[in-house]
Image (cartoon, grey):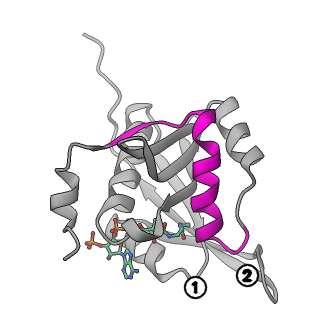
């Protein structure tokens, strides 16, 4: 039987760490399994190089998923969130999203945004579970096999977690 979310959260072997350039080929293999229009390896390298928050799940040296977030003064954007297909529905997507939200809140970000395809039920359920709310729709935002697909824009406000001066 698959491990429950709580069991997996308590498995110390799965850690979240910084994404390294050397992880990119393994990440790209998961990316190609997961999206009809995957990011290139170059996009992941650019995200690391410009200093976006790029994190991976590492299980004894194997990449199990990843998240990429850009942050400005008040806003952050989740640019990618993905879990290896055989490790889905065990709480990892939620754990990575919570980790990125915590990073953003600690940096003083007030609102976190993301786009999702309206057909991506799994992702939408995850975002709703973490209190993201729809604030807009971008028409024809995504490439699709038969043309373009809209994007739902979601937002979640974050608590102020900046460290207080002593
Ligand atoms: C979206 C994605 C990251 C979710 O990761 P995951 O590890 O499977 O998600 P979790 O197990 O943490 O699930 C979190 C919640 O999402 C919901 N959920 C996740 N997968 C689901 C599915 N296939 N069907 C229905 N609900 C689902 C559940 O309600 C779950 O709630 P719970 O924690 O209260 O049980 C994963 O499906 C994925 O990598 N998809 C391909 C890439 C992608 O589409 N990314 C999002 C781009 S916007």
- Say which residue appears at 42% left-offset and 65% top-offset: 132
- The boundaries of the magenta stretch are 15-37
The answer to whether residue 131 is visible is yes
Residue placed most toward the observer, 127 or 18: 18
- Say which residue appears at 75% left-offset and 54% top-offset: 40
Quarter of the rendering occupied by the C terminus: top left
Residue placed most toward the observer, 144 or 74: 144
Residue on which disc 1 sits: 119
Is mark 1 in CB contact (under 8 Å) with mark 2? yes
Task: Indicate whether residue 57 is drawn in magenta.
Answer: no
Which image quadrant shows ligand 1?
bottom left
Instruction: Label 2, secondary structure: give it.
Output: strand
Where residue 116 appears, as percent x and y from the top left, is 58, 71
Q: Residue furthest bottom?
A: 146
Q: Is mark 1 within 8 Å of ligand 1?
A: no
Where residue 82 appears, as percent x and y from the top left, is 51, 60
Where residue 76 appears, as percent x and y from the top left, is 55, 45
In the drawing, does residue 106 fall left or right of residue 114?
left
The answer to whether residue 52 is visible is no
């Amino acid at each position: 039987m698959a491990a429950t979310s709580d069991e997996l959260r308590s498995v110390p072997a799965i850690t979240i760490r910084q994404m390294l350039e050397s992880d990119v080929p393994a990440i790209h293999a998961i990316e190609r399994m997961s999206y009809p229009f995957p990011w290139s390896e170059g996009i992941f390298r650019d995200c690391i190089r410009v200093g976006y928050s790029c994190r991976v799940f590492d299980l004894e040296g194997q990449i199990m998923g990843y998240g990429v977030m850009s942050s400005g003064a008040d806003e952050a954007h989740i640019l990618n969130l993905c879990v290896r297909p055989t490790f889905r529905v065990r709480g990892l997507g939620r754990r990575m999203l919570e980790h990125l939200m915590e990073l953003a809140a600690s940096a003083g970000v007030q609102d976190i945004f993301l786009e999702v395809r309206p057909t991506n039920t799994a992702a939408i359920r995850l975002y709703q579970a973490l209190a993201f709310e729809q604030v807009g729709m971008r028409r024809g935002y995504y490439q699709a096999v038969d043309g373009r697909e809209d994007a739902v824009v979601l937002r979640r406000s974050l608590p102020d977690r900046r460290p207080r001066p002593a």
